[in-house]
Image (cartoon, rainbow, N blue to C red):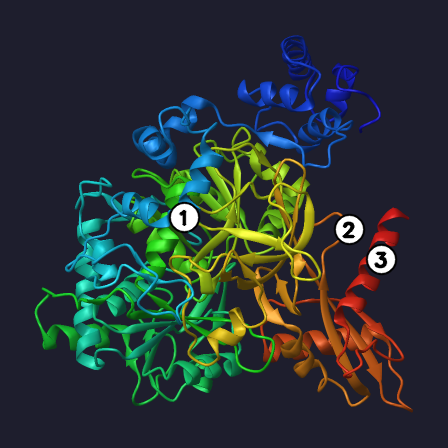
Amino acid sequence: MGKKSIRELGVDDFVKAGLSATEANELKEQLLMSLSVSSNDPADIWGDLVSRRVLKPSYPHPLHQLLYYTIYSDHQSSSPPLYWFPSLEQARRTNLGRLMEIHGSQILGASSYKDPITSFPLFHKFSVQHPEVYWSLVLKELSISFVQPPNCILDTSSDPSKHGGTWLPGSVLNIADCCLQPSSHPNKQDDSIAIVWRDEGFDDSEVNHITLKQLRQQVMLVANAVDANFSKGDAIAIDMQMTVNAVIIYLAIVLAGCVVVSIADSFAPKEIATRLRVSNAKGIFTQDFISRGGKKFPLYSRVIEAATCKVIVLPVIGNDIGVQLREHDLSWNSFLSSGKQHRSHHYSPFYHSIDSVTNILFSSGTTGDPKAIPWTQLSPIRSAADGWACIDIQPGDVYCWPTNLGWVMGPTLMYSCFLSGATLALYHGSPLGHGFGKFVQDAGVTILGTVPSLVKAWKSTKCMEDLDWTKIKTFCSTGETSNVDDDLWLSSKSYYKPIIECCGGTELASCYIMGSPLQPQAFGAFSTPSMTAGLVILDENGVPYPDDVPCVGEVGLFPVYMGATDRLLNADHEEVYFKGMPLYKGKILRRHGDIIKRTVGGHLVVQGRADDTMNLGGIKTSSVEIERVCDRADECILETAAISVAPANRGPEQLVIFVVLKNGYNSDAETLKKKFSKAIQTNLNPLFKVSIVKIVPVFPRTASNKILRRVLRDQMKHELSVHSRL
């Protein structure tokens, strides 16, 4: 592969790649047609093949690899190869393109505005410089209904301590009520399908669905029960799979004026207990078991090991709970009955100010407890607006993303659907197998979100073969670095639809860099900061590089950022996000911690973290947390240093543990790897895997005796690079 030029490839090459002789001859004719009408620019050749849908999803992956890598084999530019190109017709049908066509000339000037593709960079720049104008337009595009409208869009003068300003001051609403009420724009009616779902193991059954009206009735029923058992403002946790009931519970807690505490269903009891303690949760919703991959895994037993508060337990299958409950805990049916006794099915939402906290999520810090990040009612608006603009979520779309309400993507997915008029698609089971893929097909999913490790599993197991995913108009990816070849496989499943890369943070309630349907896309790269988000890339001295210069450095975010946090529940917000950051144009930059590369042509690639936070399987954790557990894994250990590195060919980060042994003790890397894995999976997260263990005599250190993990990371990157070339 790659030795022949694209013009030299013949029928025999296509047959060797898995096509029949008939298919190979047809492909050769189509390729010759593309070569005859295209320039010698590889992007033109690839773009013509894709636009005419020559490369079919049914073709074997080696054939897609042969064409893509051969076409781009002579790609000399330092910018990543492009695989998707928006047409002007497509661009004008997008949410943002339509908005630009209506308002572009007035905002940018009749002589400056051309069309949504040509004028996108200028429009984005305007949104950063005048965010109040952009948000005044976009708020009308979402299903947002204020009981008390805001005094203004943005106030930057009344509270100097808020670097990001005060957004929508004076406004009053209930964001869950906004999700549940019908609207004319976006078009969201009572009989619109709000959620579709299927239970694992029922792959040949009809897809279940619930209308907006039915969802509203179910949420009100649960909200009444919340009122009967809790008080306004109480923090109430959810530790469940992301099922229809989990979504109903989440919305009911917010509708009732309480606060959701998001806990992922994969956590060990110790981690659950920490989050309940930090949030001061008064109760927790959970399941008796988790059902995944045809197996049942205990969940209630993990929760009661961690929780002294009231636990409401749902059955994972049927109506009967499969565990014995503690005396003060409630079954789901008993909980609902308490609501019926308390009040009728009618429910009046609890309306409160825009800056009221509705959700507490967690993000790992570098020491001790995870950061408790409060989401106000601004946060869902920001999440939904980014999906509206960059993912192009529209009424009629069916949006699926395997995730959990314990991670930021869970609430983001839910709000993006309900505030944009799209249908939320949920699979009650493991997304790793054919059953999930068939659900995507049968539910008519139009937007499919993933994490790279999930795509890698689909590709390697070939579990999605013979399925029709061609209704998908957009893929999305987040959580970790994407692998180019895995993305090639994914995009090919729907005639090379774009994969919108998303990178952000829980504390931002959004992505600060994304792809855009108004720009050409490259695998594993970001094409733009999100709308209204401004950033600079800093050199080693904290000085910003010019905006148009290819470079690598730590990102600094403009502080005026709607939806971003202005507080933390258990840490100093100013110290975490602003202390030590440089000024830019008179304002202090906001810290995010990513190292990013800007390529020729302006694409962005995330290179890793500036601090010692790691990203393992889409879950952010810290070196300190890992090391704390590993230090106690065996008596021979003096100390450990945990780092993560991406493979030489890119892809998800791998966990590497460096070890210094005590004097007089011996052990080997393989033995320690097993012990570390067991300790981490028991005490932190069963999804974390140790890839490499290295025993070393000493650690490199700073003058103040801090471990230089960056040096260890560079050493391991070099070793992996050398190994990949052997």
**Residue 203 appearing in the image:** no
Whole-angstrom CA distance, mark 3 to mark 1, is 37 Å
Closer to us: 402 or 258: 258
Name the mark on residue 648. 2
Whole-percent x, y for residue 586 in the image: 49, 60
Which circle's residue, 3 or 1, is located before the other in the chain? 1
Whole-angstrom CA distance, mark 3 to mark 2, is 9 Å
Which circle's residue, 3 or 2, is located before the other in the chain? 2
Badge 1 density bin: few <14, some 14–19, many ≥20, Cα 10 Å? many
Label 2, secondary structure: give it. loop
Whole-angstrom CA distance, mark 1 to mark 2, is 32 Å
Kind of residue at badge 2: Ala
Whole-percent x, y for residue 28 in the image: 69, 13
Kindly indicate whether the residue at mark 1 contacts the one at mark 3 (C-beta within 8 angstroms): no
Q: Is residue 612 left or right of residue 189?
A: right
Closer to us: 14 or 256: 256
Position of 83 relative to 143 (above/below): above
Name the mark on residue 386. 1
Name the mark on residue 718. 3
Quarter holding the N terminus?
Answer: top right
Identify the residue at image location x=51%, y=79%. 271
Q: Is residue 426 left or right of residue 292?
A: left
**Residue 436 appearing in the image:** yes
Identify the residue at image location x=46%, y=65%. 507
Kind of residue at badge 1: Asp
